[in-house]
Structure formats: structure tokens, C-alpha cells
């Protein structure tokens, strides 16, 4: 096997002749000659005190290390600040770098090489690029390529497959989609379906005998042909071989990593779905409330990048949608063997004997437990025991794990299937920029609670015919930090908003956050919280009506009344009395919060509710075990 050796690079095998592939049939054994982290420059940088300005003139040589650097071979990004290195060491091992793969045992290394070969051959067979001479790209940018690796798992955390993805370095793209336009002048934005839409559709499917089919788009981004082709370097580990010297790739289809890949793919899918049937399309129309929900009189189709769900009354309609998308030139198939919706976006969807669904994220919880090193920790019955404050004088967090990463995972969990931890997670999120040991202890408390309830999940329950209505439960904790936070800190006077919006007993939307301005009374705090809830309720009512009318679900816009339940009588009077009963205190409430009064009336009412029945209590304050478990059952079903 011939090799190419360059200072600071890897000893690489030669690709097969006559086929676009990296390795010979027998196991390859590339060796690392040097590693990026062992250079003298990095060793010097690691000895610097990065917390204080240095008077050492040599330190100026390492300022650039605070920026992102690229491995000259793999084009992988590295951040060489010592803290970044520590974070990298603490990250999960499910996203190895090319350097790490090359240092793996031979049997593991070969499995990754096979994944790389599979990716390259799939791109080659799909006509994503052709090999050409560098001279062809004169005057054009040649974008570098890099590898991205991922150990893909099922929602329960079990191993699925190794995935290697050849990606463009989109962060280095300077050309736009049109000639003469730069990347800064070209938008790459693409929407994804809102989780509120997903939860509402699942609720409708449970209660109105609707069929769901999971749909997967194979190599989604590469399905779009480029109107203006661009150029890329040869893939890492190939460019040094003699037969590829002076060669580049002319990219003919969109590749992962491109600034515009998501936008181009969404436009392709949108055009195929919304084109009239007589023109070869599927005849859907885009929802006015969610641009990733497509509506037809016999189906609803939603998509999150390359994962779709077809919601229909007749399963044959879903089969026809998949057939028509393939006929339109896209590569689409049912997820799994029969397309049964057993999981979506990392959420396990378990069907129960009574027809209900349970939404769980055990795999994500396992990752959180592993990231914090809490395997075997004692479980807890509640996620929070106190209101969290800054703790300015406490000892700093020891960076034993990547707090930002853990908080990010907790936020996704809380916003997807576990609203009962929203309050606890949000108050931890406030301090991730300067965490102290008490903040880390609060996160461990949440994780201990997740250990206790890992096998549980949000239950999507059935309701009676009168239950197909949206109702909101609102609560506020007035100046909840004032007695515990530094009185000189303005945030100590802020109140917390909590609300949950349900169809029947099923939560669709919820929120727990500090209010953006200071309320001077409990009435004002509750009134502001009601305004926050109204913004989501108005949008969800439009979405609810759109879904119901599309799928012939009984829905009368006039008789379908939503109720906002409020447990503060003063706020209730201010909101519902006509003309409004303005007092010196109520006059101080910002005008922007009064807008929601115009929505109260025929279709949206505001009513009083006893505090023990208010489902939003769990979103504003820590509760005792007895109260927490009672209120958790009201919104979660367990």
C-alpha cells in the first residue's frame, strides 16, 4: 500500500483504483505521525493564565488560539483555549473526530472506514460531484470539505449505526447562490415544524382515530440540484494521493454543511408538495400558522428537516403520498418496516392499550446522566427544592462537566416532553455563564429526579367530545427572588410567569420564565403572565381550527370557546371588567400588556380557578413532594 507523508499529517492508505473509495478490502491501519494537540505552540498556550491579561510578550503570539482553528488535513474545527479543550474531553464519545478514529483499535477503525466508504460511494452514485481540474475553478472559491462522524442511537439510547458525513465547510463559504452575490447577501434560513404543532397532531390522532405514518427522506440535502454549481476541495485523506494532485470537485448537488443546504432542500420539498396535481405535484397548501405543516383535504404532512409525519384517515393515502414524492424525483421511504410512528426526533412514542400515547426520552436522559457522571446516584422525588439565586460569594463550579451542554439538553427535554422540570431548568439556565457550586448542585438535583422518573413520560390522553378545546392555566410568582437575592441586583425584583395551554388534559404549549420588566404588585405580575399566555393561545387557536377543518374534525369557531384560568381575583377583574377598572397601581402596567383584553369576549373567556387546581403552579415555584406529584399528574398523566 502506497502512502503519502507530509510533516504533521497522517500516514494514509491509497484509495481503490477505479472506484471512488478510500480503503482496500483488507483492514487498513493508518497511523498518526503527529497530533494537533502535541505541538509546541499549544503546549505553550496551555501554560498561559487565560483569566488575566498577560504582560508576557510571548503571550501575544497565542491570541489567535482563542479563535477557531482547523486541522490542515481533516478540516475539522478546534478551539484551542484550554477551557475549550477541557469541554471537548468532557463531551460524549458519540461524535469522534477523524484524529480520534485514526487512533482507535483496528476493529473499531475499520467499521468507521466502512461508514466513510458508504458515504462517498452514495454521493458518487447520486451524481453529487465530478472530479475536475483546478484550472476550471479560476476566479471561483474552492470550499474545503470535512468529515463529521456520529454514533446514531435509537430514542431509548441503544446503538443503531455509525454514520460518516462528508460536509462542506459552510463557515468558509463566501459565494452566494447567485452570481455576483456574496454569502452575507444570501439567506440560508429554513423553518422546522414547531413542537406545539407535533403535540397537537398527536392529540388529534389519539382522539379522532387518525393514522400516522413516519416518513424518512434519504440523503435529504443532496436531493437538490444546484442551479449554480460550486467547487470543493478533494475530501480529507484523498487530496494527497498522486492521482488527485491538482484535482478538485465540481459540486452539482447540495451537500451537507453548505450554508444553503437546508434552505434549498426545504424549497425543493415545498415546491413538490404544493405544486398542483395536474403539474406533477401533490396538491398540498402551506399552513398559515406553521410553514412546515402542509394541508390537504385528506391529509396533513409535517416535516422537521428530513423526518416527516403523514396524518391521514386512510393509510392508503399515506402510501400514495410517499409514492408521489418518489415520482417527483425525491428519495423517500417509510421509517422502519411499516412506517409506524414509534419514535420522532429522539422521542419514543409508545402506544398503550387504552389508545393513549406516552412520549418518552430515555436516551436523552441517559446522555444527561452520563454527561454529569451521576450513574448510580440516589434518585430524588422532585426536581427543585428552592429558588435559585446568583450566589456571588460561593465557590466557582469546578468544570467537572460541560454545564452549557447539559443545560442545553435539559432545556430540550423540558420543552419537548417534560414540562414539570421547566421551572427548575430555567432557573439553572440563568447562571450558566458564571456557574457556582450551588448551581451545579441544582442541576444534579434535576438529574437525580430524572433518574427517578426516567421510564416515565408525557401521556397523551383521550378526552370526551366536549374536550376538543384549548384552555390556558396561568400563574405568577411575584418578586420570588426578592427575599433571597442581593437587593442591589435589579433582577431580584422580577416575577416569574408560568402557563400551560392544553387540549383536554393534554399540554400543548407551556412556559416558565422571568418577566421582562418589574411588576409592582401581585395583580400586575398575574396580569402580565396572562398576557404572555394569550399570545400563545391566539396562535394555537388558529392552528387548532386549521387542523380540525382539514381533517373533518368537528369544530365550530363560534361555539369552540377557550378559557384562561386565573387564580388572582384582582387580575381577573382588571382583565374582564368593561370599562377597565383602572387604579393608580394598574395604571403603571405597561400598555403592551393590555392588548390581550381585545381578544377576550366571545371566543376567549377568563375565569377564576382555585389555586390547588391551577396546573401552572408547577411552573413558577418549587413545591413540596405531595403538591408536586399531584400537579404533575394533572399535566403529565403520571
Image: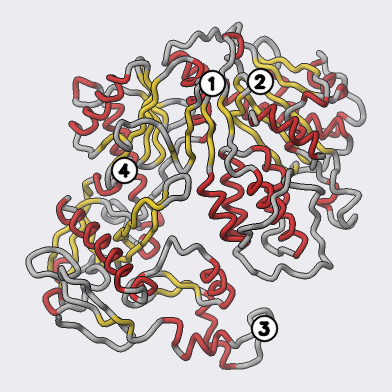
Q: Which of marks 4 and 2 is in front?
A: 2
* Location of mark 2 (residue): 471
The answer to which image quadrant residue 143 occupies is bottom left
Residue at horizontal 11%, vertical 75%? Answer: 243
Give the residue pinned by disc 4.
265
> Is residue 526 shown above or below 89?
above
**Residue 256 shows in this picture:** yes
Query: Of marks 1 and 3, which one's residue comes earlier in the chain?
Result: 3
Q: Mark 1 points at which residue?
A: 542
| Circle 2 SS class | strand
User: Which quarter of the figure is the N terminus placed in?
Assistant: bottom left
- CA gap between label 4 and label 2 equals 36 Å
**Which quadrant would residue 504 be assigned to in this image?**
top right
Q: How far apart are marks 4 and 1 (CA)?
A: 27 Å
Residue 431: percent from left, percent from top: 71, 58
Sequence-wise first label, 4 or 1: 4
Name which of mark 3 and mark 4 comes first in the sequence. Answer: 3
Split into 4 quadrants, where in the image is the C terminus? top right
Q: Which of 261 and 356 is in front in this view?
A: 356
- Disc 2 from disc 3: Cα separation: 55 Å
Dot 2 or dot 3, earlier in sequence: 3
The 10 Å Cα crowd at callout 3, few under 14, some 14 to 19, many 20 or more, is: few
Classify mark 3: helix, strand or loop: loop
Q: Counting residues from the N terminus, which is met first, the one under dot 4 or under dot 2?
A: 4
- The answer to whether marks 4 and 2 mark residues whose Cβ atoms lie closer than 8 Å is no
For disc 4, the neighbor class at 10 Å (few under 14, some 14 to 19, many from 20) is: many
Q: Mark 3 highlights which residue?
A: 53
Q: Residue at x 30, y 69 (%)?
A: 107
Separation of residues labelled 3 and 4 (CA atoms): 47 Å
Q: How is the image coloured?
A: secondary structure
- Alpha carbons under labels 1 and 3: distance apart: 55 Å
Amino acid at each position: 500500500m502506497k502512502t503519502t507523508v507530509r510533516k504533521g499529517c497522517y500516514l494514509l492508505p491509497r484509495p481503490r483504483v477505479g472506484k471512488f473509495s478510500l480503503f482496500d478490502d483488507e483492514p487498513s491501519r493508518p497511523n498518526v505521525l503527529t497530533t494537533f494537540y502535541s505541538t509546541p505552540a499549544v503546549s505553550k498556550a496551555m501554560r498561559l493564565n487565560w483569566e488575566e491579561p498577560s504582560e508576557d510578550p510571548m503571550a501575544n503570539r497565542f491570541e489567535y488560539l482563542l479563535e477557531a482553528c482547523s486541522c490542515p488535513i481533516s478540516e475539522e474545527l478546534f478551539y484551542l483555549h484550554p477551557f475549550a479543550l477541557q469541554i471537548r474531553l468532557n463531551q460524549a464519545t458519540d461524535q469522534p473526530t477523524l484524529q480520534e478514529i485514526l487512533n482507535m483499535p483496528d476493529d473499531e477503525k475499520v467499521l468507521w472506514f466502512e461508514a466513510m466508504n458508504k458515504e462517498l460511494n452514495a454521493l458518487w452514485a447520486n451524481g453529487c460531484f465530478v472530479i475536475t481540474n483546478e484550472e476550471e475553478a479560476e476566479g471561483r472559491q474552492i470550499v474545503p470539505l470535512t468529515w463529521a462522524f456520529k454514533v446514531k442511537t435509537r430514542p431509548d439510547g441503544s446503538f443503531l449505526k455509525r454514520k460518516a458525513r462528508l460536509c462542506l465547510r459552510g463557515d468558509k463559504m463566501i459565494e452566494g447562490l447567485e452570481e455576483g452575490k456574496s454569502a452575507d447577501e444570501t439567506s440560508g434560513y429554513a423553518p422546522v415544524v414547531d413542537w406545539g404543532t407535533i403535540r397537537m397532531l398527536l392529540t388529534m390522532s389519539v382522539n379522532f382515530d387518525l393514522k400516522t405514518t413516519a416518513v424518512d427522506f434519504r440523503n435529504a440535502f443532496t436531493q437538490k440540484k444546484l442551479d449554480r454549481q460550486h467547487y470543493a476541495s478533494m475530501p480529507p485523506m484523498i487530496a494527497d494521493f498522486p492521482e488527485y494532485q491538482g484535482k478538485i470537485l465540481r459540486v452539482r448537488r447540495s451537500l451537507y454543511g453548505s450554508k444553503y443546504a437546508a434552505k434549498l432542500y426545504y424549497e425543493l420539498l415545498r415546491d413538490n408538495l404544493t405544486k398542483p396535481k395536474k403539474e406533477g405535484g401533490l396538491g398540498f397548501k402551506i399552513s398559515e400558522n406553521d410553514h412546515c405543516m402542509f394541508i390537504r383535504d385528506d391529509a396533513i404532512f409535517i416535516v422537521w428537516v428530513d423526518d416527516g409525519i403523514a396524518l391521514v384517515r386512510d393509510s392508503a393515502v399515506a402510501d400514495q403520498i410517499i409514492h408521489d414524492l418518489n415520482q417527483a424525483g425525491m428519495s423517500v421511504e417509510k421509517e422502519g418496516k411499516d412506517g409506524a410512528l414509534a419514535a420522532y426526533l429522539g422521542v419514543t412514542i409508545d402506544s398503550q392499550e387504552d389508545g393513549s400515547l406516552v412520549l418518552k426520552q430515555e436516551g436523552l436522559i441517559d446522555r444527561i446522566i452520563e454527561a454529569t457522571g451521576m450513574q448510580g446516584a440516589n434518585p430524588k422525588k422532585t426536581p427543585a427544592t428552592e429558588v435559585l439565586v446568583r450566589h456571588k460569594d460561593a465557590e466557582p463550579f469546578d468544570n467537572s462537566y460541560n454545564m452549557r451542554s447539559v443545560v442545553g439538553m435539559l432545556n430540550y427535554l423540558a420543552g419537548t416532553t417534560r414540562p414539570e422540570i421547566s421551572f427548575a431548568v430555567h432557573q439553572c439556565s440563568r447562571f450558566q455563564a458564571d456557574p457556582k457550586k450551588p448551581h451545579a448542585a441544582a442541576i444534579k438535583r434535576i438529574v437525580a429526579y430524572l433518574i427517578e422518573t426516567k421510564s416515565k413520560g408525557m401521556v397523551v390522553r383521550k378526552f370526551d367530545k366536549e374536550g376538543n378545546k384549548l384552555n390556558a392555566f396561568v400563574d405568577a410568582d411575584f418578586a420570588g427572588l426578592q427575599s433571597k437575592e442581593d437587593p442591589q441586583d435589579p433582577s431580584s425584583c422580577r416575577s416569574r410567569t408560568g402557563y400551560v395551554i392544553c387540549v383536554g388534559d393534554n399540554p400543548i404549549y407551556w412556559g416558565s420564565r422571568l418577566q421582562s420588566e418589574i411588576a409592582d404588585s401581585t395583580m400586575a405580575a398575574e396580569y402580565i403572565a396572562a398576557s404572555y399566555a394569550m399570545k400563545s393561545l391566539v396562535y394555537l387557536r388558529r392552528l387548532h381550527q386549521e387542523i380540525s377543518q382539514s381533517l373533518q374534525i368537528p369544530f365550530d369557531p363560534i361555539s369552540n370557546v377557550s378559557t384562561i384560568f386565573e387564580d388572582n381575583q384582582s387580575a381577573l377583574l382588571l382583565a374582564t371588567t368593561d370599562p377597565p377598572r383602572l387604579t393608580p397601581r394598574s395604571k403603571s402596567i405597561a400598555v403592551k400588556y393590555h392588548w390581550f383584553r381585545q381578544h377576550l369576549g366571545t371566543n376567549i373567556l377568563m375565569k377564576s380557578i382555585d389555586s390547588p387546581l391551577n396546573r401552572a403552579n408547577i411552573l413558577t415555584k418549587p413545591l413540596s413532594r405531595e403538591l408536586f406529584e399531584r400537579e404533575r399528574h394533572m399535566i403529565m398523566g403520571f
